[in-house]
Image (cartoon, rainbow, N blue to C red):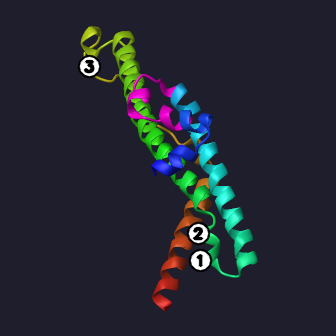
Amino acid sequence: MKKILNSLSEDEYVLVLDTKKDRMADLDEDDLIALHTRVRRARTKYTKNYRRAGADKVGDKKARGSGKSANARNAGKAEVFEDALSRVSRRLAAVSKQSARDLKDERLQRARRDAPSFSDITTGTGKAVSSGKARVDATRAGSGKKKFEASSIAAGARRQAKKDHR
């Protein structure tokens, strides 16, 4: 692993150092997302290079095992960035979860502050009041109601007869 870290370019090495726990401690969610994107791109780059070079070497050497050993540097770099990506992902998940908790607490406090409580309401007896009119189904009023009910009964009878016949 040391050998691979020493073979990284300066920018890549700084990127890996930026994923250390103490460096990520004071980053906010947006900064972590930006870091996550940078590390993911580097990981994808070396994973792609590893796969492509491996596929090319298999064609040249006619064996997958021989092609893999010649491509160890790209594989090592891909692994270094995979580890870095997992560190950033864990930290981002923790910060996002905390941020969501804070937003939820803030929303609940605002709702408690702005909404009247039930103990503040002193008017009324606590009972629902109705005008006393009976509810009438206006959609079925008239001669269509008999036909509708007869149709429903007949459909039910047909379903039952079908079940009985089985």
Q: Residue 63 versus residue 140: which sits nearer the camera?
A: 63
Amino acid type, residue under disc 2 in the picture: Ser
Label 3 sits on a secondary structure element that is loop
The answer to which image quadrant residue 8 occupies is: top right
* Left-right relation of 119 to 21: left
Amino acid type, residue under disc 3 in the picture: Gly
Measured Cα–Cα span from mark 1 to mark 2: 7 Å
* Left-right relation of 33 to 83: right
Q: Residue at x 46, y 48 (%)?
A: 2
Q: Residue 56 versus residue 95: which sits nearer the camera?
A: 56
Q: Is residue 71 visible?
A: yes
The residue tagged 1 is 65
Q: Residue at x 62, y 40 (%)?
A: 9
How many numbered marks have been drawn onto this rendered protein structure?
A: 3
The residue tagged 3 is 126
Q: Position of residue 76 (x, y in %)?
A: 54, 55
Measured Cα–Cα span from mark 3 to mark 1: 81 Å
* Left-right relation of 160 to 150: left
Label 3 vs 1, first from the N-terminus: 1
Q: Position of residue 18 (x, y in %)?
A: 50, 32
The residue tagged 2 is 69
In contact (CB < 8 Å): disc 1 and disc 2: yes
Q: Residue 138 versus residue 121: which sits nearer the camera?
A: 121
Measured Cα–Cα span from mark 3 to mark 2: 81 Å
Label 3 vs 2, first from the N-terminus: 2
User: What range is drawn magenta here?
Assistant: 15-29
Q: Position of residue 91 (x, y in %)?
A: 42, 36
> Closer to us: mark 3 or mark 1?
1
Amino acid type, residue under disc 1 in the picture: Gly
Label 1 sits on a secondary structure element that is helix
Q: Residue at x 65, y 72 (%)?
A: 67
User: How packed is label 2: few (under 14 Cα within 10 Å), some, or many (20 or more)?
Assistant: few
